Image (cartoon, helix red, strand yellow):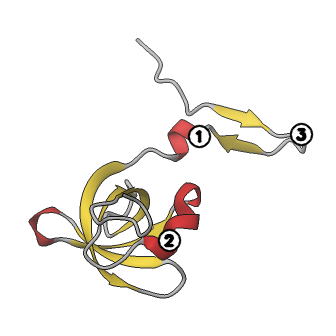
Amino acid sequence: MELQHAPRFFFHSRGVASMTKTEKEAGVGVEGKVIERMRNARFRIQIMHGHVVMAYVAGKIRHQAGKILEGDTVGVLLSEYDLTQGRIVYLMNSRPQPGRR
C-alpha cells in the first residue's frame, strides 16, 4: 500500500509552519475580460461561457492596477475552493502605450 504524501511545509524562524509557494498558488488558470472596475483594486471579470468572477490584483502586478481598464484581457487564477473568486496574475496589453512607438 502506497502512502500519499502530505503537503510540503517549511518552518520560519519563529517555528510557524506554512505551505510552499507552488502549493499556495495552486488553482485554475483562465483568461477573461474586465467588465467592471471596483474599489480596492478589485475587478469583475467575465470568463468563458459567460461566467462572471470577482478578482483582485496579485502582488506582482499591483503597480499595474491603475493600467487595467474595462475591456482589457487578463489572466486569472481561480481559487480551487471557490470558483467565483480569483486573482489577476497577468495583464495582456492589447492597447498601445502612450509615449511608445
- Residue type at mark 3? Ser
Residue drawn at (53%, 59%) of the image: 61
Identify the mark at residue 31; answer none if there is no mark: none
Residue 62 place in picture, x, y as percent: 56, 65
Q: Mark 3 against mark 1, which lies toward the viewer?
A: 1
Calculate the distance from the C-alpha at mark 2 to the C-alpha at mark 1. 23 Å
Identify the mark at residue 21; answer none if there is no mark: 1
Q: Mark 2 against mark 1, which lies toward the viewer?
A: 2
Q: Quadrant of residue 40?
A: bottom right
- Characterize the local packing of mark 3: few (<14), some (14-19) or many (20 or more) Cα atoms within 10 angstroms: few
Direction from residue 95 to residue 68 in the image, left or right? right
- Characterize the local packing of mark 2: few (<14), some (14-19) or many (20 or more) Cα atoms within 10 angstroms: some
Q: Nearer the viewer, residue 83 or 3?
A: 83
Q: Are marks 2 and 3 in contact (CB under 8 Å)?
A: no
Q: Residue furthest top?
A: 1
The mark nearer the N terminus, 2 or 1, is 1
Q: Quadrant of residue 67?
A: bottom left
Task: Provide the residue designation for mark 3.
Answer: 13
Q: Is residue 99 above or below residue 24?
A: below
SS state under label 3: loop
The mark nearer the N terminus, 2 or 3, is 3
Residue 74 place in picture, x, y as percent: 32, 61
Task: Provide the residue designation for mark 2.
Answer: 65
Residue drawn at (50%, 71%) of the image: 65
Q: Quadrant of the C terminus?
A: bottom left
Q: Residue furthest bottom?
A: 39
- Residue type at mark 1? Lys
SS state under label 1: helix
